[in-house]
Image: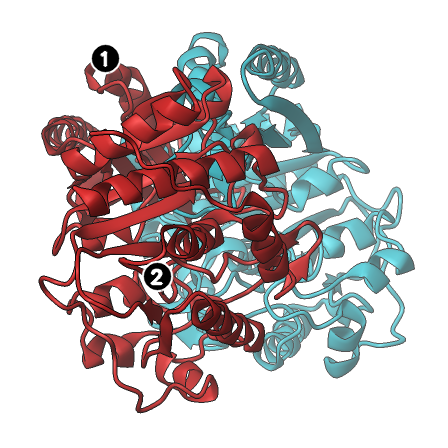
Chain colours: A cyan, B red
Amino acid sequence: MPLSNVSIDGKRLLADLYKLREFGTYKTGVHRPTYSKVDMESREWICERMREAGLTPEIDGVGNVIGRGEGDGPRVLLGSHTETQPYAGWLDGALGVMYGLEVARAVGRGVDVISFADEEGHYSSFPGSRSYIGAFSEADIDAGRNKYEGTTMREALATAGLAGRRRVAFEPGRYKGYIEAHIEQGDTLESTGEKIGIVTSIVGIWAFRITFEGVQNHAGTTRMAIRRDAGLAAVKLIAAIDALFPTICAERTVWTVGRITLDPGAGSIIPGGAEVVFQIRDADSEVLRRMGAALEGLVAEADKGPCRVALHNVSRSTPSLMDAGFQDALERAAERFAPGLHQRMPSGAGHDAQWLARVMPSAMLFVPSIGGISHHWSENTSDEDIVLGCQVMATAIAEILAS
Amino acid sequence: MPLSNVSIDGKRLLADLYKLREFGTYKTGVHRPTYSKVDMESREWICERMREAGLTPEIDGVGNVIGRGEGDGPRVLLGSHTETQPYAGWLDGALGVMYGLEVARAVGRGVDVISFADEEGHYSSFPGSRSYIGAFSEADIDAGRNKYEGTTMREALATAGLAGRRRVAFEPGRYKGYIEAHIEQGDTLESTGEKIGIVTSIVGIWAFRITFEGVQNHAGTTRMAIRRDAGLAAVKLIAAIDALFPTICAERTVWTVGRITLDPGAGSIIPGGAEVVFQIRDADSEVLRRMGAALEGLVAEADKGPCRVALHNVSRSTPSLMDAGFQDALERAAERFAPGLHQRMPSGAGHDAQWLARVMPSAMLFVPSIGGISHHWSENTSDEDIVLGCQVMATAIAEILAS
């Protein structure tokens, strides 16, 4: 099939992105928390842009902004999210929403655009995309609470003027699928000089708490031989993980100890308790199972020592496979505009696309992150790479709509 | 020299200890924070007991309670402290003060008794004994602050009615020396079935902060190969200490990681910073120097890795040697009343005696701690062991005064 000759307007795209950055500018980045005044103002501004592009906009009861095009025929849903982490980057999800808007303008018809609310999880875990696919209940809204300052999600929605609005649910059969652009948030593309990442899957995350129970005692009067030091048990387990995991992991598996807490945490007291916050990510469920089993083995071995060691599952998300046909379309478009400078890669971070993939074919396209920096105001992508990514996306969307 | 036939009154001693426990009883222990109402009431009660024993009591401007005997001739100072850690044991330092009182009564003359204020460090580091030897300035009082609830030491002294009182300073030449009894706070005596510990020295403590500087990044999108994980660097250093230190330590050396802090400490963020609170204790300065140098070596080695690692000295206290003649006297008395059931041992914990040793010959005697428990309300020593320890002390004091 010949590739479409659709052409995006790079200047218009960049102008919109620059304008969106003005809502909550912080240094060269943005501070635009979910449901804040500036976040709601940006959503209204997005509605105006959608209207200009011939879409009918709506801000729904959870803050999702959806712009629907008229007419029948094949249709795709494009988007991402526009609120930010605190004092974070100007692109992140904003890139994907503005790509959607620009592709809608360039392709002309068959494109709906969405900005999912609170992908960054200020109030809950993916409330926008989960609400859209029917996996976020009223009780989930009731339970939502701002993790930084404690406001309930209900209060925040009321303050934002969204109380009582209907929540938009996806319409089965309306779309061929969902495609989301995002910055890579890592340095894989930059380190290889490549321009486009075609996401094969969004990783699953297995998150754990590991607890250690020893005996708290005086750090001066308790001989080394009789200590049951919960902190030392934690250190030994983490060192054992560090020794074993590289020998059994897959190429892209990552694992992280994010927090270590010793109880009571005083210089002159042997810790009687310890807790380790640990997670493993991989795009392959089989790899996650293998690593999880290895972790269980290490914990069981550690439990034979002087402290009681226990593994607690916190959450297990399943890797989300991206649609193969969409990947092929994105790859053909990438090869046309950035020949040899694209790769297929998993997404190590979570995205709204992992929820959309439960109800329709979904795909993601990445553009390079300068220095791999993410969730920091200095996050950036070159204007050239931003424009190139959108052109690749528009070309792939035109092909998908025509196929 | 024949041993004295001095004999203590065990029932009187135990009755006084039981009575003192009533000031702030918590379960079978005591909650008697420095300068609290109940602490000040207990100090007044101690003054009454001193008066009954023929001593002239005084509560000074830092809360020290000293009871002085009349007359000339050889003289010793006996004591310890009577405030407690929060919700802690009934004996701890109270044992040493009540031993002093009972020995003063049994021996008849030549014994002054002291209860040093705040050995447990609610407001500062050994303010009572340091004030007494002239090593605690008015500026030190100004800087004192309750570590649990923030009240300044000045405020607390005023509330306790001590503002403006003179601070008692030791009188050079008045004493042959200072002798302090205390519970062992470990399980060395219990584990060998012995009854009396004769302290050879009080350990020095070398305390450190070790800091790790890596690069904070996203735990999903940052490949393992390029991570600079400050938490992992901390874990590896602690594991290296755990491997090396047992090969270079002395018999009684102890070392402790009391706290590990990862920054920012979130499950999905690779820690960009870490801090480890570490200490080494030994009774031999040479051992402390050797261990400290080994630590410096491990830190320098760690600093060659992906994170910057730095060692910060927090404090270095010098081991305090106990007087050899006093140790001999205590050992002879112990052999008479507990033949074969005594040992010489270092003190792993700090005590007022480490400060007194700077200005006069000093010594310490330990009695067994049941289960080695200390700084907990369940701390205990059998009545029989309490009485035995005091009889040994009285006999040694009589010999020292007669020599």
Mark 2: which amino acid? Val
Whether residue A210 sits left or right of residue A89 in the image: it is right
Q: Quadrant of the C terminus of chain B?
A: top left
Between discs 1 and 2, the one toward the N terminus: 2
Alpha-carbon distance for marks 1 and 2? 44 Å
Which residue, as the protein is rendered here, is positioned at the far bottom? B164
Residue B35 vertical position relative to residue B282 in the rendered view, above or below = below
Q: Position of residue B99 (x, y in %)?
A: 43, 50
Q: Position of residue A399 (x, y in %)?
A: 62, 37
Whether residue B401 sits left or right of residue B59 in the image: it is left
Q: Which label sits in the foreground, 1 or 2?
A: 2
Mark 1 lies on residue: B247
Residue B344 vertical position relative to residue A167 in the rendered view, above or below = above
Residue at 68% in and 57% down? B26
Residue at 18% in and 32% down? B299
Mark 1: which amino acid? Thr
Which quadrant of the structure image shows residue B132? bottom left
Residue at 16% in and 39% down? B323
Q: Position of residue B209 (x, y in %)?
A: 26, 46
Q: Position of residue B360 (x, y in %)?
A: 13, 53
- Local packing at callout 2 (Cα closer than 10 Å; few below 14, some 14-19, many 20+) is many
